[in-house]
Amino acid sequence: MRRFVGLLAVVIFVLAHPAWASEYTVDSDSTKIAAGAYGTGSDGAKSNIAAADSLLNATTIAQSGTVTLASANNLWRATSTITITQAITVPRQHGQPRGSYPTTWGSPGIELGDILATLGTKGIPRPIRPGGGGSSLCGGILQMFASGNVSIGAAVTATGTNTTSDGGGGGGLVVVVSAGTISGSGAIDVSAGAGHGTAAARGGAGSYSGEPGGHAGYGGSGGGASQGLAGGAGGAGFITGNAGGNSVNNQGGGGGSLDEVGEIGSADGATFGGDGGNGSSILALSVFDSFQSFLPRTVPAASADGVGVGGGTLGTGGTNGGGGGGGGQDAGTSGGHGGSAQTTNAVGSGGGGAAFGAANGGNGSAGSTALYTLSSKSVWAGLPGGQGGGGGGGAGSSGTPGNGAAAAAGVSAFVSGHGAGGGGAGAAGANGSGGNGGAGGAGGNGGGAAGLVVLIAPTVTYSGTVTGRLVIIEGNRAHHILKGLFYN
């Protein structure tokens, strides 16, 4: 029983002191596992860092040429000095799989406390991947620990990137710890990847700045249908666009809006075109709460009603830039045209479907640059994608389908130079196809969050440019941090 209690006490102590626990988990090489914060120097003097040098336990570390490391997780220790004179590039890590986390949301960032708790180990937490689940998109990790001085005289790069139809990967992590002075002016870049330009409504990855990735953009809405066919689907997004109305009895369906589905043609009677989806909620706001950051916007006028004569009742255009109204048709006559969505201060709504005969579908409206949701107000957070365009309305049997509309560009950083990834543009709405309404475009992909650079030393004179978040701990605070982390 005493042996069990003693073993339990050791386990509890190790769990409560992650820096100690990590000494027995970071690598299969026990001579390196047993090293302290600055190592034992068992690798001797390292005069030129090689690509394979993921785990170093040297006396001194230096370079004679540029290097792209092979591992995305690197830990270097030196009992004396570290001198960086040539560029170092850290490859990208896969990050954690998304699991059930929503694909349209920017994934959360990693807090500074979680990083400090695992400092000096290879157990640094991994960010969650962008919404599309792409691998090798998030910036990698480089930690340098030296009992002597550290000089950063050349560029260190640990950036995120993107891949087709995915959000941006977050920036990487660079940690420099010295018991002496950290100096030099080499740039350190831990910037994130932007949302990819092929819109697929995927969120970006969070990262070591502690900030989340950008959300996907809003979807555009579908166009109404004609000829008894189906309205276009709403585009995927952080908020999904709504579908256009179906056509019944040769009456045109109304175009969809961000707030409402387009009404079915003949929903109010056998010769009624469907009303366009109204802007009854989000589209009615003159200021838009984008994560507690109110954006003033001009509320658009109503979209067009169904157009022309045909004996039937024409659908009404949606309020506040909602979907275009559907065309109506009386038995034996050519029907009315579908109404187009409002193009002034457009909000990605669908065009109305036409009625029977030589009637044309209405046009969709472009995505809005004022409708998006920020995942955070921080300058290091990823930015959201742009809204998709509205789909065109379906045409009568001898008419012309309506055109889909252009999407909005992704949101760019409000303050440049901090390493946050911008959002990707949304997708254009599809044209109507015969009597079918065109689908609304997908929202753009969100950008990744900036990475982090941590410098800990009694004296820090480093003056290089950091693209990303920078945390410097110096003076007495550095001594306290180092003693608390490594029990030196």
Image (cartoon, rainbow, N blue to C red):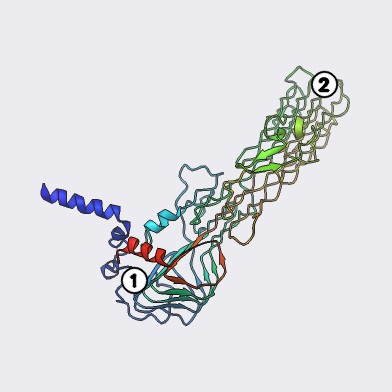
Q: Pick the quarter of the image with the C terminus.
A: bottom left
* Picture coordinates of residue 465, whole percent (x, y): 57, 69
Mark 1 falls on what kind of element?
loop
> Looking at the image, can residue 295 be seen?
yes
Question: Which numbered dot is residue 261?
Answer: none
| Residue count near mark 2 (Cα–Cα under 10 Å), binned few <14, some 14–19, many ≥20 | many
**Label 1, on which residue?**
38
Relative to 58, say whether 371 is above or below. Answer: above
* Picture coordinates of residue 370, whole percent (x, y): 70, 44
* Mark 2 → mark 1, Cα distance in angstroms: 82 Å
Residue found farthest to the front:
476
Q: Nearer the viewer, residue 349 or 215?
A: 215
Residue found farthest to the left:
1
Residue found farthest to the right:
309
> Looking at the image, can residue 371 be seen?
no
* Picture coordinates of residue 313, whole percent (x, y): 82, 21
Q: Is residue 186 left or right of residue 351?
A: left
**Count of number-bearing discs:** 2
Question: Which residue: 51% across, 50% down?
Answer: 133
* Amino acid type indicated by mark 1: Tyr
Q: Closer to the camera: disc 2 or disc 1?
A: 1
Q: Is residue 260 left or right of residue 38?
A: right
Question: Which numbered dot is residue 313?
Answer: 2
